Image (cartoon, helix red, strand yellow):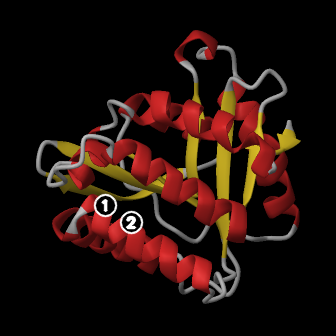
Amino acid sequence: MKRATLADADRVKNILLVSFKNDPHVNFLLEESKNERKLNILIDYVADQTFRRGEIYLSDDDNGVALWDFERNEKMTLHSIWRNLAFLTRIGIRSVIRIVKSEAHVHNNFRKYLRYCHLYMIGVLPEAQGRGLASRLMNPMLQTMKEKSIPVFLETANLRNVGIYKKQGFKIFETLTVRDHDLFLMSTESSIDEIS
């Protein structure tokens, strides 16, 4: 694994675009937007935000990427204000409201911890799936957080991924039904009761 830099931004975004093209929750969040490039706009926003306040790791073969967010907040800068306004105008208010509501519910679950780590997004190209790449992308950060006793959180709308995450020590602590799909909220925090 290697820590991605801004020079890797296009590769990071391309992996995420392919990985989240058919994600039911992302599609729900963006369905109100009239912009034909709405997924690209979302991925650009998330990648830029994570480069500035989190960490992004690429697999050595550039087939997978993991975006990690932490408890630290991004400083209010002209860049962040501009990014947020541009996102709003390009995606539209209805989709932004959906995104903000979803993020608020998800983040309320771990903001109560003094320190936390959030696996914001992880993607593996289809041709590289089934080879343990997602686990290899997660292992270093999960080990570091375990050593520091910092809980790790994630959410997924892909039932197949739930099994992968459970093997990594995650437990489902809440399942949200969002129209035609479920969103599974998961954590490594031992004090959280697992929901089947």
Residue that appears at 68% across and 14% down: 131
Residues at marks 1 and 2 touching, judged by CB atoms closer than 8 Å: yes
Whole-percent x, y for residue 178 in the image: 18, 53
Mark identifier at residue 112:
none
| Residue in front for this viewpoint, 78 or 190 | 78
| Residue in front for this viewpoint, 16 or 109 | 16
Q: Quadrant of the N terminus?
A: top right
Which of the 4 image quarters holds residue 187? bottom right
Which of the 4 image quarters holds residue 115? bottom right
User: Measured along the vertical axis of the image, is residue 149 above or below residue 51?
Assistant: below
| Residue in front for this viewpoint, 126 or 169 | 126
Q: Is residue 109 visible?
A: no
Residue that appears at 84% across and 27% down: 60
Label 2 sits on residue:
87
Tag 2 secondary structure: helix
Residue 79 left/right relative to 101: right
Residue that appears at 16% across and 50% down: 34
Whole-percent x, y for residue 160 in the image: 42, 28
Q: Is residue 194 visible?
A: yes
User: Measured along the vertical axis of the image, is residue 18 above or below residue 73?
Assistant: above
| Mark 2 crowd level (few <14, some 14–19, many ≥20, 10 Å Cα) | some
The amino acid type, in three-letter code, at marker 2 is: Phe
Whole-percent x, y for residue 46 in the image: 53, 57
Residue that appears at 47% across and 34% down: 17
Label 1 sits on residue:
90
Task: Quote the CA–CA distance across marks 1 and 2.
Answer: 5 Å
Tag 1 secondary structure: helix
